[in-house]
Amino acid sequence: MRVPTLSLLALFIAIALLGGCATPSRPGGMTAQGVSVSHRSAEALSIVVTGGKSTSATGMPQISDADFREALKQSILKAGLFNQVVEDQGGHYRLEAYIGSLSQPMFGFSFTVEMEVSYRLVDLSNNSTVWQKTIKSSHTATTSDSIVAVTRLQLANEGAAKKNIESAIGDMDALALR
Amino acid sequence: MKTGLSFVLILSVAALIVGCANLNSSRAPGADLSKIKTIYVQKLAGEDWGADKLIVTALETRGYQASSGISATPPTPVDATLTYEDKWMWDMTMYMIRLTIQIRDPSSGAIIASAESYRPSLERKSPEFMVNEVLDAIFGKPK
C-alpha cells in the first residue's frame, strides 16, 4: 500500500515539474533565418494573418495571428524579399495568410506537427491576385529537443511554421516581383 | 527501462490532457459558405468507426447534399470537400477528445473554413454531439 502511494506522490511531483505551462509559439522561433532570394521588390507590403489561435484553456501551445504575422514580417525583411513591411493596410502588395490547420499529437515521445497555410498575394494597385497557394509543412521535435512535453510541442509548432514561411518566401521569390 | 518509458509517456499525456472544453472556428478571408450546396466528405485513412457517415448525416440534416468516400477526389463535382481529424483518449472508457473539421475548395484543396472541438475527460460528449457542435461552428445552427 505504501509503494503505490509513494509512486502516486512522485508522479504528481514529476507532473508538476515536467508538465509546465503551455506558452505560445514565439515569433523568433518561427522566423526563417538565412533564406536567400534572387529578386528583391522595392515595394512595400502589408500582411494580414487569420486562422491562428491563442494558447488558452486547452493547455496546448498554439500559434496566434499576431505571432505568425510577426514571424512572416521578420522573415521577409531578413530575406529582403520586400523593401518594407507596413503595419497598416497600405503598401503596394498585401499578403494574406490563413492558418487553416495546425494538427498536433496528443502524446508521445516525438511530436510531429503538421501545418497548412493558404497564402494569397494581392497587387493593391489593381486588386489582382498575383500568387495563391496552400503550403503544407511539418516538423518533429523529440525528447532530445526538450523533455518537457509542452515545450516539445511548442518547438514542433515553431519548426512547422518556419518551414512553411521558408517555402512561401521561395515561391514569392520565383514571381520576380519588382 | 520499460517502466521508465511508461512513466514518461504518462507524464506526457498528463501534461497535455488538461484544460477546459474549447470550441473555435475560423474562415479564410472572403470565404462564402452560403453558396455551398453539395459536400464530399473524404474519409480519413484508417478511421473505422464511421465518422464519415456521422458527418454526412449531420450535413444532410442541415440541408446539404452530402456523400463520402476514400478517394481524395470527389466522384462527381461538388461545391466543397470536407476533411476531418479525430483524436481519442481512454479514461475508464474511450472518448473523443478532439475533433477538427476543415472545409476545402474542391479545385485547389485550400482550406476555406475550419473548426475544432476539444473536450477533455470530465467534459466528454458523444461523437454525434461533437460532430454537430463543430458543424454548427462552421455553418451556423440548422434552422
Image (spheres, coloured by chain):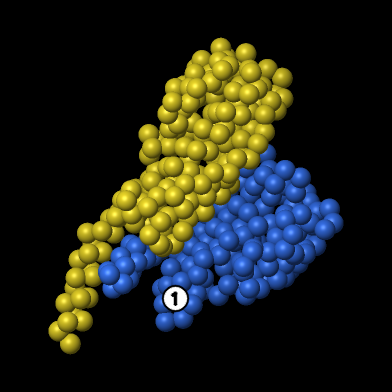
Q: Residue at x 39, y 43 (%)?
A: A25
Q: Quadrant of the C terminus of chain B?
A: bottom right
Q: Measured from the top left, where is residue A44 in percent x and y?
A: 55, 17
Does residue B36 appear anywhere in the picture? no
Q: Residue at x 42, y 72 (%)?
A: B121
Across the whole image, how many numbered discs are drawn on residues?
Answer: 1
Reading the image, the residue beneath label 1 is B90
Q: Is residue A27 left or right of residue A85?
A: left
Q: Is residue A145 left or right of residue A170?
A: left
Which is more toward the observer, B11 or A46?
A: B11
Q: Measured from the top left, where is residue B42 in percent x and y?
A: 70, 60
Q: Is residue A93 left or right of residue B42?
A: left
Q: Which quadrant of the figure has residue A2? A: bottom left
Q: Is residue A90 above or below residue A48?
A: above
Identify the colour of chain A in the image.
yellow
Q: Is residue A20 above or below residue B48?
A: above
Q: Quadrant of the N terminus of chain B?
A: bottom left
Q: Extreme left residue here? A: A2
Identify the colour of chain B in the image.
blue
Q: Residues within 10 Å of mark 1 (few under 14, many from 20)?
A: few
Q: Tag 1, which secondary structure?
A: strand
Which is more toward the observer, B89 or A33?
A: A33
Does residue A140 appear anywhere in the picture? yes
Q: Extreme bottom residue here? A: A1
Which is more toward the observer, A66 or A148?
A: A148
* Chain to which mark 1 belongs: B
